[in-house]
Amino acid sequence: MNQVYEKLMKCYESVRKKVDFVPKVALVLGSGLGDYGDSIQIEQVLDYHDIDGFPVSTVQGHKGRFLFGYVENVPVVIMQGRVHYYEGYPISDVVLPTRLMKMMGAEVLFLTNAAGGVNFDFQAGDCFEKEYNNTKETATKIRTDKPYTGQLGDGFSNVASEQYRDMCDVYRVELKKGWTYQVNVGPLQGLAIAYLFDKDAQLGNSWKDYGTNQNVVVPYTGSYYIQIFNYSDDQYEYNLNVKTVAPVGTTLTKVKKGNKAFTATWKKQSVSGYELSYATNKKFKKAKTKKIAASKKKVTIKKLKKNRKYYVRIRTYKMINGKKYTSAWSKAKTVVVK
């Protein structure tokens, strides 16, 4: 038996003398995430110091302990703090905790870490282009409602140079038919220009330009491209964000009267949900609004006033990164309840 395995077995036997919990999932918490462990349903806690031969964390902010408990009824083992190679430990000690959690019973491992840069202009969550992305085939794929940072080389100062390939950046983003978006590129300083165009356009040739920094309703679901040019003699840095302004709306197909009630039906859309508004006046003063699940395409509103005329309208909404986007209200329909 080699020394690495002997040390691992020694740690395992030491753990089992103190803890009988069997996890299915292992989670290693990196810098800044240690507090997450305190939010779970904790059953047992074991400090690294109490495990015979186990390497101990020396980095500030790493508590240095195992947490055993449940996340949404899933049994987990969590490392609040890890050991690093730069702390002076051999690689065999750095990977020992992972091997140990496997022996405890864990079948799935989640690793986390803190990452950053030395540029003070960077913000949390910033993403960057992948060079060279100057054609449709090499376009950097991006997501909506997420900021990106890019850089263009000097355009015509030296067309034979390597930087000439970087006078143009192309991005690809997936958009949905009927939804409203805004492409924000800036600052568009000097001779830098940007376009949003569809899948049929040829780069630098036949443009179907939807413009930038203005709202646009896209005509189909699929890939769209953003092309940014630099015609100046200077390098150019920019920020890019394709923002969702509003999801596609819907229309009421029928509003059927009932006994102090009405039933509304509408065209189903791919959204997070619907909001139905109804009132006894066409200006919707003091209107009531009901939130409806995305899986529904009709709803019955009860406990209404008998023989009253109601105005009814509907809109969709979409939740993106915790923010709610709503479509315009549909054209109102009227109904007189029994």
Image (cartoon, rainbow, N blue to C red):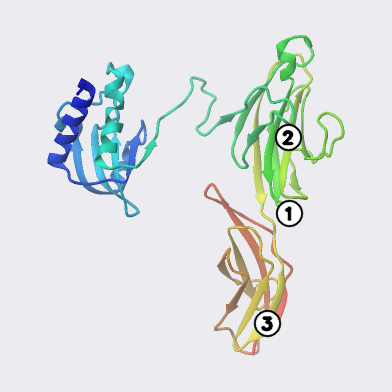
Q: Amino acid at mark 3?
A: Lys
Neighbours of disc 3 within 10 Å: few (<14), some (14-19), many (20+): some
Residue depicted at 40% across the width and 34% down the height: 112
Q: Nearer the viewer, residue 103 or 234?
A: 103
Q: Secondary structure at mark 2?
A: strand
- Tell whether 97 sits left or right of 232: left
- Extreme residue toward the front, this view: 1
| Residue marked by disc 3 | 256
Q: Secondary structure at mark 1?
A: loop
Which label belongs to residue 178? Answer: 1
Distance, label 3 to label 1, CA atoms, is: 28 Å
- Tell whether 1 sits left or right of 266: left
In the image, residue 61 sits, relative to residue 3, either above or below, namely below
Distance, label 3 to label 2, CA atoms, is: 46 Å
Quarter the N terminus occupies: top left
Q: Amino acid at mark 1?
A: Gly
Q: Secondary structure at mark 3?
A: strand
Q: Nearer the viewer, residue 79 or 279?
A: 79
Neighbours of disc 1 within 10 Å: few (<14), some (14-19), many (20+): some
Quarter the C terminus occupies: bottom right
Q: Nearer the viewer, residue 43 or 144?
A: 43
- Extreme residue toward the right, this view: 206
| Mark closer to the chain start, 3 or 2 | 2
| Mark closer to the chain start, 1 or 2 | 1
Which label belongs to residue 226? Answer: 2
In the image, residue 24 sits, relative to residue 330, either above or below, namely above
